[in-house]
Structures are given as structure tokens and as C-alpha cells.
Amino acid sequence: MEICMDFLSCLDHDTSMKILMCLEDPSDLVRASSVSRSWRDFVIANGLCKQLCLTMFPHLLRVDCVIEPSCVKEKASEVGCSKFVEWETLKREHEVYAFLAQGCLSFPFEECIKDAISASSTDNYPDESIRNTLQPGNRYWSSKGQRKAAVPETLVYKLVADICVITEINIQPFQAYFQYGSPIYSAESVRFRLGHPKCPMDDTLGEPLDDSADDKFIWTYSSSEFPMAQESCLQNFKLPEPVVCIGGILQIELLRRVQRQEMDGLFYICVAYVQVKGRPLSSAFGVEMLGPSGKFVLKAKRSSPPSLPEDASYHDVHLHGLVDSEQMVNLLGGRSTHGI
């Protein structure tokens, strides 16, 4: 007869933590939490899914609290001791952070720009508006001309979701075939910032403005400079690692001008198309910014996987846990199973 032993119960707390924290995939932690009641309680009580998620995506350290709007009314009527409330909070965070971590890794890649907000300058508005950069074609955005090549320009965009995992930005400089020599009005280099508005923004943005926008947004991420080639192709700028953008705002900084226009002797930067690739998480999560602190409320829109029955025996829990594991792992992978 095979002897089964729960080795976790034979180890001290620190050793158990070191073993389980070696797991680098949130799906593995979910599987571990479904082995038995004691394993589940250990993973939840120590917030291992939350710790893994924050290690993978440090920008999520600014989460102030996690809520599930669909459960607010139901929870509001419940009364219990502080330990019960604390345990329910830990269970909710376990489920939400496990799903969030895997969502950041496995949600489908999409184009992430929703609309244009502003450009630091526009030469011939609205014919050369920043909005021309939203679709590939023959139209373009042009800055105003400058005598000094060092004067930068910025383009600000609204992303499709308030929480997105951004992996790359692609930019196509504009080539003016209608001018002598077909000059390409690229920048010398480019830098990217991600952040959120200081105040709530309307979904309908209206016409883009000429505005540097630095006083309207808080930037929580700034990339290093990427060199830009003086070529009219779509140029790829891949971030060193995926970045979670909280607040849904992207700023493109176009640094140093390289092309002087022959007819007026001024330097210009012109962009034909901007594309942002990443994983929008709006189908599963929302955010509510908490003022200029940068902290935010993470809103989980999905339904939680079924919980384990409180009165189940070890054998029943073990079997039930396997079912929960399959459901949660499938959920993390973007699939659904019967009953979810």
C-alpha cells in the first residue's frame, strides 16, 4: 500500500516558503494551492500569488486595494469577526493576483492605441494633426519648424484600456515625396513615458490639442532613449521588458531634429504612423486612480472560481481542489471549463 505524506506539514515555515517561492508560474502556485486544505491555506495566508505577481510586474506595487464590484453589495450585508474579514480579503487577493499575473503573460496581443490626445506643436492644424498617425496611409503629423535642432516634440495618446501590458511601440517617420530630394523628417532618438491623468478624463476626448501635457499627467515609467533611423519604414522599439501601464496614457518624446526643410530653413519632425502593441486587460480588470499619489484601486470584473466547501473532509477537499485547479488554470490560460 502506497504511503502518502504531506511533506509541507513536516517542514518549518521558512523552508516551506523557500520551496514554494521557487515557483515562477502563477498556474503552478494555483495547482499547489489545490493539493490539500493545508497547502491551500498556506499559499493564501502568505500571499504567495500576490508576491509572485508583484515580483513579475513591480508597477503593481501601487495597488492600494483589490475589490470585486459584483460582490460589493453582497459583502456589505455580511457581518463577521475581523479574522473572517481578513481571511476573505486574503482569498480574494489570491484569486485576483493569480489571474492578473497570468493575464499579463497570456492575454492576446492587440493594438493598444485608442485615440490621440495632444501634440506639443502642429504645423498646419488640422491637416497635419496628430490624429493622422492613428492609421497607416499618406497623411501625417508635422511639428512646427524650429531654428534649433535640439528642440524636442511630444505626442500623447490614450490607450484602449486603463491597464495594459505594453511590449513595443512602432513609429514610421514621414517621407515628403512632394519636396525636392524626398526628405525624411525623423527624430534622432525617441523615448517613451507611461502614466495616468491627474484628473479623470472623458471617454470622448474631442479634437487633439497643441499642448506639452506634462502638467496634466503623472508619468510612472520612462524608457531609455532609442536611436531612430532616418528611414520611412515602420521602426520597431521593443521595451527591455513588458511594462504594466496603469492609467492608459502614452507619451512619445521625439528628441533632436535631423531634417531641415529647404524652403524655410527650419527643422521639422513628421510622423506618418504610430502603433503600440501589448495586452489590454480591460475585459478582466479596471482601475480607479487615488489622486496624485499614484496609488490605485484594482477592480476585478470577473467571477471568482468556485471556493472549497468549508465542511469538506480531507479526501473531499483533495478531489475538489483538483477540480478547482483545472478550472483556475484554464481560466488563467484564457479557456473556460464546464461550470465557469
Image (spheres, grey):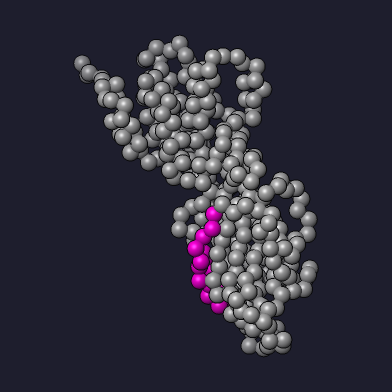
Q: Would you say 54 lies left or right of 193 here?
A: left
Q: Residue 246 location, x and y as percent?
A: 59, 47
Number of numbered callouts drawn: 0
Task: Name the foreground residue: 297 vs 275.
Answer: 297
Q: Residue 103 location, x and y as percent?
A: 51, 42
Task: Name the foreground residue: 321 vs 129.
Answer: 129
Q: Is residue 224 magenta?
A: yes
Quarter of the picture holding the C terminus: top right
Q: Is residue 38 magenta?
A: no
Is 148 drawn above or below residue 117 in the view shown? below
Residue at the spot x=37%, y=29% of the render?
Answer: 32
Query: Looking at the image, which residue sits at the far left?
Result: 1
Task: Name the foreground residue: 105 vs 80.
Answer: 80
Residue 278 visible, this orientation: no
Q: Would you say 93 lies left or right of 173 here?
A: left
Q: Would you say 140 lies left or right of 12 here?
A: right
Quarter of the picture holding the N terminus: top left
Residue at the spot x=51%, y=52% of the render?
Answer: 243
Is 63 drawn above or below residue 126 in the view shown? above
Q: Quadrant of residue 142?
A: bottom right
Is 26 drawn above or below residue 203 in the view shown? above
Residue at the spot x=49%, y=35% of the render?
Answer: 97
Q: Residue 106 location, x and y as percent?
A: 49, 45
Residue 220 visible, this orientation: yes
Q: Residue 242 location, x and y as percent?
A: 49, 52
Residue interval drawn in magenta: 221-237
Task: Name the foreground residue: 239 vs 195.
Answer: 195
Residue at the spot x=74%, y=74% of the render?
Answer: 123
